[in-house]
Every structure is written in C-alpha cells, then in structure tokens.
Image (spheres, rainbow, N blue to C red):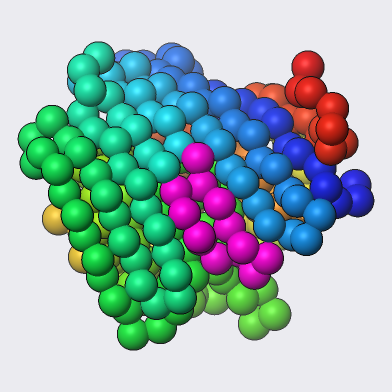
C-alpha cells in the first residue's frame, strides 16, 4: 500500500506453562501510522492479567530512518497508578521527564557515544519493530546493538517508567512461512540471544515479524520462567483519512 497508511490490529497473549497451556493472560491493541514521508507513530494499549496486573499505554514516534524521536508511556500495576513518562531523543541524547508512585518526580538526561537507534518501551508491537535493527544484508547470524535505552529493566515493563540502558544481541534465523490467527504471512524469524545489563537474565525469546519492512510482530515465544506466547490476532491495512473499523 502506498504511503500514507495505517496498520491496525491486536495481539493475543497466552501461557505456555504446563498447568495453563493456551490460557489467555493478556492482550494488546495497536495502531501504526506510516506518514507520507516515512515517519511512524506507534500507539499501543496492553494488558497483562497475571498478578500483579499490568496495564500500559504507549505512543511513540519514529523519524524517516526509523529512529525514535519521542515517546509517552503510562503504566499501572495491580490496578494502581505506577508511573508516566515523556521521553525525548535527539541524536545521541535521551531525556526523560517522569512521575512515579515510588520515585516521585524524576528528570534524566543521558548522552550516548553514538546516535540512538531505537527505544524499548515494552509494547509487543514495538518489540517487533526493534528487529529492524538487524542488518538483513549480512544474512543469518548474530548482531549486537549497543546502548539501547528501555523504559524499564523489568521483563514485563512494570517499573518506572524511566531510562535504563542495555545491549541487545539479535540472531536472525531466516525466512519462514507462518500461519497465525490473523492469517498466513511470510515471516522473518529472530531470536534475542543475550540482553547484557538487565538485573535478571532474560529468558530465551523468539520473534517472528512480517517481511514487508513494517516488522509487524506475528508470533513471539518466551521460555524460561515466563513460558509465554504471543500471536497476532487481527491485522488490517487502513488507507490514510479513513477510520479503522
């Protein structure tokens, strides 16, 4: 579809734990607006039912090269306000203005050795787009992304939100044909093999995204103690100027 357009959909969260296989544990609704010049605005509302329940609202913006420019994040944990924050990215500088129920008012300004390439805000739709950091021209293998800012070091994104930095090692496995609730797609299969800098080691994490350059997440599987499954349940392309139905 020619720009501008939007991608609207939802992601189904289920458990892979032995005593809960296939049980719904959350959901996410998202909208990606691709503007005429290639800029993107990604909005997502996510809910994790597992106690303590997490509810997250995110609106992030990317420039024509897919780099973050700003993001708003608000989370509640256990059905109570946890925090909200505005993040701004300008070249190799990241800033955060936050208010949280634990830390109170927080102001952060961090300077990085290189321009900031991405921001991890814990929305699943954003995790998919993070895979665009991998240079596919080099074929299957492992590539390391240095100094990736996150909104939280917690695996569920249930702290902060504030700036926290990690490195990410991404493995590209290859292309696959994948059938999910939303349909059948040509998929790019990635795997997060290491996330140095987190307080707790992240479990093995496989992701499948669309191969059309939009990197819409089709499926994700997290092992270890989490044992969770994510699947694209709805997917619609919406021409600019028309409401999503």
**Depicted 129 relative to depicted 22: above or below:** below
Up/down of 223 relative to 74, above or below? below
Residue 14 seen in the current view: no
User: How far from the left and from the top, in percent, is residue 8?
Assistant: 70, 31
Q: Is residue 86 above or below residue 228?
A: below
Q: Is residue 207 shown left or right of residue 97?
A: right
Tell me which corner region of the image, top left, top right, bottom left or bottom right, holds residue 237: top right
Q: Is residue 67 visible?
A: yes
- Which residue lies at the image location 38% right of the left edge and 39% below the top edge? 73
- Image quarter where the C terminus lies is top right
Query: In the rendered structure, does residue 41 fall within the stretch colored magenta?
Result: no
Q: Residue at x 55, y 65 (%)?
A: 67
Return the x and y of residue 85 as percentages of the image width and height. Answer: 31, 43
Dominant secondary structure (helix, strand or loop) of the stretch shown in magenta: strand
Q: Position of residue 84 (x, y in %)?
A: 29, 36
Q: Position of residue 93 (x, y in %)?
A: 36, 72
Q: Nearer the viewer, residue 143 or 103?
A: 103
Relative side of 73 to 183, left or right: left
- Is residue 182 shown above or below 72? above
Q: Which range is magenta?
A: 59-71
Residue in the image at 91% along x and 51% along y = 2
Residue at 56 percent across and 51 percent down: it is: 61
Front-lying residue, 50 or 178: 50
Q: How many marks?
A: 0
């Amino acid at each position: 579809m020619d720009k501008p357009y939007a991608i609207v959909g939802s992601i189904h969260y289920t458990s892979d734990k032995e005593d809960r296989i296939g049980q719904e544990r959350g959901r996410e609704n998202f909208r990606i607006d691709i503007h005429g010049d290639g800029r993107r605005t990604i909005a997502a509302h996510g809910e994790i039912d597992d106690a303590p329940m997490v509810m997250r609202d995110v609106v992030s913006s990317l420039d024509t090269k897919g780099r973050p420019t700003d993001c708003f994040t608000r989370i509640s944990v256990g059905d109570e306000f946890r925090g909200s924050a505005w993040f701004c990215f300008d070249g190799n500088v990241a800033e955060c203005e936050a208010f949280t129920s634990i830390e109170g008012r927080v102001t952060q300004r961090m300077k990085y050795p290189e321009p900031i390439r991405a921001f991890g805000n814990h929305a699943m739709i954003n995790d998919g787009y993070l895979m665009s950091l991998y240079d596919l021209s080099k074929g299957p293998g492992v590539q390391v992304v240095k100094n990736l800012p996150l909104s939280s070091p917690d695996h569920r994104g249930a702290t902060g939100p504030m700036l926290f930095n990690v490195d990410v090692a991404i493995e590209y496995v290859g292309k696959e044909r994948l059938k999910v609730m939303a349909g059948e797609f040509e998929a790019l299969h990635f795997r997060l093999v290491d996330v140095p800098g987190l307080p707790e080691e992240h479990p093995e994490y496989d992701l499948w995204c669309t191969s059309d350059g939009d990197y819409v997440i089709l499926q994700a599987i997290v092992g270890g103690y989490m044992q969770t499954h994510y699947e694209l349940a709805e997917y619609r392309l919406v021409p600019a100027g028309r409401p999503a139905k």
